[in-house]
Amino acid sequence: AFIMEPKKSVGEFLKEKGASVSNFIRLEVGEGIEKKEEDFAAEVAAQIAAAKGE
């Protein structure tokens, strides 16, 4: 379903606008949001070192 008009399909919307899809990517929820893993002690030590440097 097209988000702006749930009763209309994406295909119908594209046809109506005279557009076409040349490429698409399917993403899972949360995919692409990789968080850098860092242990808590190292993070605290880095913050203390940064505070001493200021």
Image (cartoon, rainbow, N blue to C red):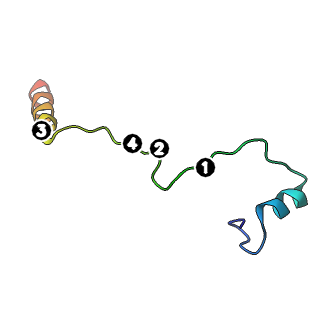
Instruction: Tell me which numbered mark, 1 or 4, is placed earlier along the sequence.
Output: 1
Residue nearer the viewer, 34 or 45: 34
Instruction: Tell me which numbered mark, 1 or 2, is placed earlier along the sequence.
Output: 1
Residue 39: give x, y in percent of width and height: 17, 39
Q: Secondary structure at mark 2?
A: loop
Residue under label 2: 32
Residue under label 3: 44
Residue 13: give x, y in percent of width and height: 82, 62
- Asked whether, in this view, residue 4 is left or right of residue 54, the answer is right
Q: CA distance from mark 1 to mark 2?
A: 11 Å
Label at residue 45: none
Residue at x 89%, y 58% (from the top left corner)? 15
Q: CA distance from mark 1 to mark 4?
A: 17 Å
Whether residues under marks 4 and 2 lie with C-beta atoms below 8 angstroms apart, the answer is: yes
Instruction: Tell me which numbered mark, 1 or 3, is placed earlier along the sequence.
Output: 1
Residue under label 4: 34
Residue under label 1: 26
Badge 2 amino acid: Gly
Q: Quadrant of residue 4?
A: bottom right
Q: Secondary structure at mark 3?
A: helix
Badge 4 amino acid: Glu
